[in-house]
Amino acid sequence: MKREDLTEKLLDIKREKGWTWKHIQAEIGGLSPILITAACMGQMKLPKAQAAKAAALFGLSQAEERMLNEAPYRGSIPQMPPTDPLIYRFYELVMVYGTTWKELIQEDFGDGIMSAIDFNMTMEREPNNKGDRVKMNLSGKFLPYKYYDNEDGVPEYGFKEG
């Protein structure tokens, strides 16, 4: 079985049982609800305890449980640019604001990147009389580039210089 097959199996069971992601997240527990959903979608791994809970919930085999605990091959969007309108809007945000985010982050923090590994994310519904809004909070650790073989007072990392 490939990881994509397990994802499809989980989605089929979710559909058949009429479960919501909130129900699945509550049953598995121990992690961010977003991370649990991402793991079920094949983009993250579950720690052993959560993989066991997911296996019990979905009625999975031991091999499938172990697969939930393996580091996945990430990046499930089948083509770029994405064609799904919701996913495309995130792509569009990066195309329009990516250079702006880069400039503002590096001006404030220095020469580096925002981690998507040491990362937190929340999502909530924000009521609005003109139509509810999706509020997302993304928080990634700043990782400065290392300036190797640095000499003559050149800093070791690209943190913003005072």
Image (tube, rainbow, N blue to C red):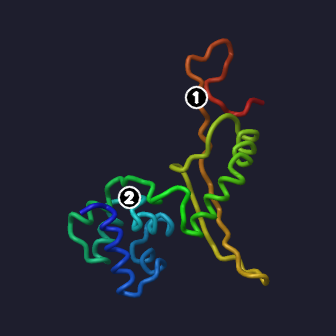
Identity of the residue drawn at 67% across and 69% down? 135
Please state if 8 lies on the left or on the right of 145 as rendered. left
Identity of the residue drawn at 39% across and 83% down? 15
Residue receiving disc 2: 45
The alpha-carbon separation of the residues under discs 1 and 2 comes to 29 Å
Q: Which of 74 and 123 lies nearest the eye of the viewer? A: 74
Q: Which of 12 and 122 lies nearest the eye of the viewer? A: 12
- Work out whether 26 lies above or below 52: below
Asked whether disc 1 touches disc 2, contact meaning CB atoms under 8 Å apart, the reply is: no
Q: Which of 158 and 11 lies nearest the eye of the viewer? A: 11
Q: Earlier in the sequence, mark 1 or mark 2?
A: 2
Identity of the residue drawn at 51% across and 49% down? 117
Provide the secondary structure element on which disc 2 rests.
loop
Q: Residues within 10 Å of mark 1 (few under 14, many from 20)?
A: some
Q: Residues within 10 Å of mark 2 (few under 14, many from 20)?
A: many
Q: Which of 70 and 102 lies nearest the eye of the viewer? A: 102
* Three-letter amino acid code of the residue under disc 1: Lys
Identity of the residue drawn at 51% across and 67% down? 34
* Three-letter amino acid code of the residue under disc 2: Lys
Q: Quadrant of residue 83?
A: bottom right
Residue receiving disc 1: 146
Work out which quarter of the rendered image holds the C terminus and state it: top right
Please state if 98 lies on the left or on the right of 69 as rendered. right
Work out which quarter of the rendered image holds the N terminus and state it: bottom left
User: Furthest residue to the top?
Assistant: 152
Provide the secondary structure element on which disc 1 rests.
loop
Q: Quadrant of residue 53?
A: bottom left
Q: Position of residue 27 (x, y in %)?
A: 40, 77
Q: Quadrant of residue 132?
A: bottom right
Q: Position of residue 46 (x, y in %)?
A: 37, 61
Please state if 130 lies on the left or on the right of 123 as rendered. right
Q: Position of residue 18 (x, y in %)?
A: 41, 87
